[in-house]
Image: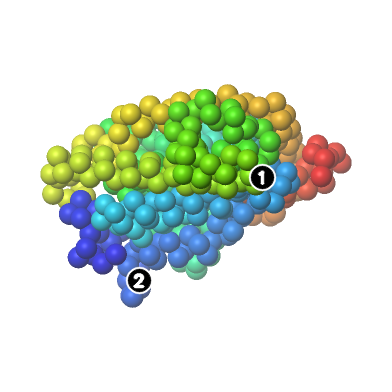
Amino acid sequence: MNAEALAPWASEPQRSRGRRRHEALAPPRNEHQRDRDRIVHSTAFRRLVYKTQVFINHEGDLFRTRLTHSLEVAQLGRSVARALRLNEDLVEAIALAHDLGHTPFGHAGQDALQACMAEHGGFEHNLQSLRVVDSLEVRYPDFDGLNLTFETREGILKHCSPRHARRLAAAEPGGPAQRFIDGTRPSLEAQLVDLADALAYNAHDIDDGVRAGLISLAQLGDVPLFAHWRSEVLAQHPALAGQPGRRLLFETLRRMLSAQIADLVQTTAALLADAASPDADAVRALPRLVRFGDALHAQQAELKTFLFRELYRHPQVVQSTAVARTVVGELYAAYTTRPQEMPADYAGAGNLPRAVADYIAGMTDRYALREHHRLTGRRLFEH
């Protein structure tokens, strides 16, 4: 979208707060397009293809990974950004980078690393994503990291504990952690990616859960948000009720997503019109303006409760995540005891616990399993 077509409250690339290390412009790309390109070409981005969303990577080829999830978030985010005349390039950059710091084995890996690092500064995947783009990527001769713009970095750091926010703000006053101290909001584009993230994982976790046989369409009939759109599909296509295959599920999810996007656009547009904020900085001092309507938000909460109860806490998922925690915990113990088992740039780091956490967090599911087998001689997952 051309800068002239952006809404007054959109983040304009030519008014970016800039990069930590100054670089000359690189036309014809604007600064946020340049961020997106650096993210796509990064090593961390490529690794997302073998990192878990819900199901461990070896459990099937068709389940979502962190990479496919990030692409879906970017697609949903750009669609809404275009409708609201926000900065699509910034939305895409944030969406593609928001999970770069995720560990192998999803939240199970994160929980395990957090336990291991409890006495060494802790571990948060949002902080790790920022750490990846700020320092861990090694690609350029003049700086560590990707040297992204403030706006992209701010969107990547969507959550941050007060303790970590104070530490980051002390090192970089006015940086992406400052808002957690001031109580202000991020850009509208960052707010949008946060909601697109939730939209994407709710929909694809239903799809993956049904594919895995852990939840059924009958169970989903008790979830109002899903049941409404399934009923509408069956009213228009009654033959789908008796057909094998997944057309009924796909069409229900498609309509459910479309309805949520429409609600998000309508609600946000109304709030922006009422706020009458003149520019991108003014909206930071206001309550969150990128929102769903209250009725839909309540239905989404019911869906989320269902997924936690029936999918994320399903015995099969719990069993896999318990094994994953063991893998990560034992890798951490092995590397801290024998740092020479890591590459030299990690083994020789001054802060060994953080170097071990960085190394493990960067692993794919299958590499973590191979390393665990190499170091312990045990295979904890059946292939």
Marks counted in the figure total 2
Q: Is residue 118 visible?
A: no
Q: Distance between the Cα atoms at labels 2 and 1? A: 47 Å
Q: Amino acid at mark 1?
A: Pro
Question: Does 2 appear above or below 104?
Answer: below
Image-quadrant location for residue 358: top right
Q: Which mark is residue 244?
A: 1
Question: Does 95 appear above or below 375?
Answer: below
Find numbered disc 2 in the image and state the secondary structure of the residue it sits on: loop
How is colour applied across the structure in the image? rainbow
Q: Which mark is residue 146?
A: none
Find numbered disc 1 in the image and state the secondary structure of the residue it sits on: loop
Q: Nearer the viewer, residue 105 or 370?
A: 105
Q: Amino acid at mark 2?
A: Arg
Residue occupying image coordinates x 41% and y 61%: 35
Q: Position of residue 329 (x, y in %)?
A: 70, 33
Q: Position of residue 158 (x, y in %)?
A: 40, 40
Residue occupying image coordinates x 32% and y 42%: 264
Q: Residues within 10 Å of mark 1 (few under 14, many from 20)?
A: few
Residue 177 relative to residue 273: left or right: right
Which residue is tagged 2? Answer: 29
Q: Position of residue 263 (x, y in %)?
A: 32, 41
Question: Does 206 appear above or below 251?
Answer: above
